[in-house]
Image (cartoon, rainbow, N blue to C red):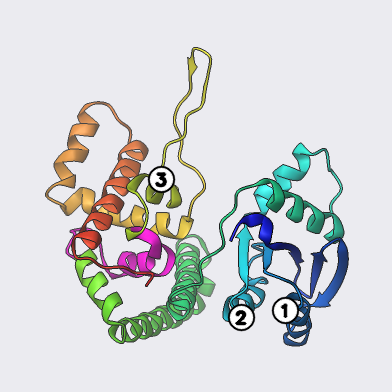
Amino acid sequence: MKRDDYCLVAIDVAKETLCVLIAGRLFTVANTATGLAALLKHLRSLKCPWVFCEATGGYERALVAMLHQHAILVTVINPALVRHFARSEGIKAKNDPIDTHMILRFAQQKDLAPSVPPKRPELTALMDRRTHLSDELTRERTRLQNSSKLIHASIRRMIGLLEREVKRIEQAISRLIEKDDTAHYAVDVMQKTQGVGPVTAWAILAYLPEITQLSRNRIVAMAGLAPFDKDSGKSKGPRHICGGRHKVRNVLYMAAMAACRHNPVIKPYTQRCSDRGKDKKWIFTAVMRKLLIHLQRNLKKHQICLVS
């Protein structure tokens, strides 16, 4: 079907409400199971609805899951893009109705693709929880270094609790992977690359399942590892990476650190880069790209598809 055949629906998602714009009609429903059921009735009355909403820190998850469950097209948009678009249109005010109209205008003018239903939502949820706990564990370990000895016993108890909970989450992830033959095989293949451990492999499964479906340039950009130009006329600015899926980039950074020390291919490469005067940030970014492309190549070689 052509894009013009769809009825475009914009929804501004908040914690408690959904502001919906359908064919010029603006209304609000509760961001609850009851509200979603009422919204579904409206959408089913349309011919070929296509819903557009912003990512809002997780408040959109129930809506998106409901739409995927009922085979209704949905595109989740980066809210920063819509905000920049509104500013380019001279719109400075911000409220739910204005945001909803901006989402619709953005969707009408941009060539957006439908969001793909998550293949392994349970794995994504567990990986998110592991990140929550690991971040808090890092903060507690930092507090142990720069706080009064009076509270060290409390901090150590919290560190022990967090370490045990991280271990439980990792065990749950391992059990989940064991039940999925494709995921188990993919994790084994990825861990054959020296420097890539189970956490990196799990993150690729959870956050970058398209790794074997896209070209290497697109997958590098999706991970936020593509250097962007900053030139004007004869001026050549430094290249910088930005955007992308930071959860993938974070684990690749840790894998790159290990690979720089122990990988027999990466280690001499980093030494050559250092000898040419490249700084550590440049080297680590280059290694992260190399690791990601190598993982993609190995998964393709073994004919592993993570989205089917």
Numbered badge on residue 267: none
Residue 121, given in percent of the width and then of the height, sits at 48, 77
Examine the rendering and report whether any part of residue 256 can be seen: no
Residue beneath disc 1 = 44
Judging by the rendered image, the residue that carries numbered circle 3 is 225
Q: Are marks 2 and 3 in contact (CB under 8 Å)?
A: no
Q: Is the C terminus in the top left, top right, bottom left or bottom right quadrant?
A: bottom left
Whole-number angstrom distance, CA of label 2 to CA of label 3: 35 Å
Label annotation for residue 70: 2
- Residue with the most extreme top position: 234
Overall secondary structure of the magenta stretch? Answer: helix
Query: Circle 3 — which element?
Result: loop
Magenta region:
192-211
Residue 141 location (% of width, % of height):
44, 66
Q: Nearer the viewer, residue 61 or 218?
A: 218
- In magenta stretch: residue 90: no
Residue in the foreground of this view, choosing between 102 and 197: 102
Q: Which of the 4 image quadrants contains residue 182?
A: bottom left
Would you place residue 258 above or below residue 139 in this image? above
